[in-house]
Amino acid sequence: LKVIECDTYESLSKNAAMMIVQQIAEKPDSVLGLSTGGTPVGMYKELIKLYRSNQVNFEKVRTFNLDEYVGLDRYHPQSYHQYMYQHLFKHVNLPENQRFIPLGDMDLIESEVNDYEEKILKNGGIDLQILGIGENGHIGFNEPFTPFNQSVHTVKLAESTRRANAKYFSSIEEVPRIAITMGIDTIMRSQKIVLLISGNRKKEAFQKLMSSHISEEFPASILRLHRDVTVIVDQDALFESS
Ligand code: F6R
């Protein structure tokens, strides 16, 4: 794992945005894997700024999001469809038919599991995947003990994950119990991976990532077997060595 330590969240966000810009400069029709949550908000802001100053062009880019809640309307403000629209898509020139997010509609879910994986493959696989990490080491919605060999699948969310996400809903009851996510196998097939770790709530996760053995108990540990992972971590998430 290559680790970039940043003093601030702002600097983490800029570094991450620059990695995307560089990727698109090298390959204008790159396939990007995108994530949601609190951590990449700053990265998307930076990307929008870079787009406005003509430093990046999304015209040929294709994007695949990691995950989506199941049973939440795609127009619900907390759906990842809405998140992506508000934080990136409505601001940049990425054509609508080149943006992919798993469909979380209850009645489509069985076919979506296969369709989404197939779409990723048909587009040539992911060139650069952006990831965040859960306090329990989850990546995407791959909770502890998810088999490493899974592709796109549905999951029952861990209670800790539902609690962590409850702040975005009016009550914990409203947080969906099921999600659809790229599997660990889908993620590991990306050419490059950038993992963002920010804030003191992620200190332990960062430390475990750096030190623990590779085990399904801590899903992110698998990243140590990937040949091109960059971890961008801010000061608040760095474990104090003293
Ligand atoms: C989001 C995702 C999740 C988050 C993780 C961290 O698409 O797949 O794995 O990256 O839960 O979330 P934040 O950044 O909100 O702490």
Image (cartoon, helix red, strand yellow):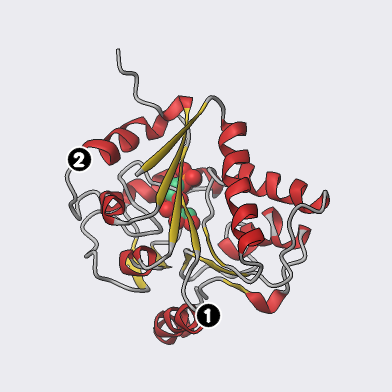
- Answer yes or no: disc 1 within 8 Å of ligand 1: no
Label 1 CA crowd tier, 10 Å (few <14, some 14–19, many 20+): some
Residue, x 54% and y 44% (percent of image)?
38
Amino acid bearing label 1: Asn
Looking at the figure, which quarter contains the N terminus?
top left
Instruction: Using the image, tell me which numbered label, if any, was put on residue 212.
Output: 2
Secondary structure beneath dot 2 equals loop
Q: Where is residue 105 in the image (x, y as percent from the top left)?
A: 51, 77
Identify the residue shown where x is 60% and y is 32%: 11
- Alpha carbons under labels 2 and 1: distance apart: 34 Å
Quadrant holding the C terminus = top left
Q: Quadrant of residue 179?
A: bottom left
The image shows residue 184 at horizontal and vertical percentages of: 32, 64
Q: Which mark is residue 123?
A: 1
Q: Along the horizontal axis of the image, is 37 left or right of 3? A: right
Mark 2: few/some/many CA within 10 Å (<14, 14-19, 20+):
few
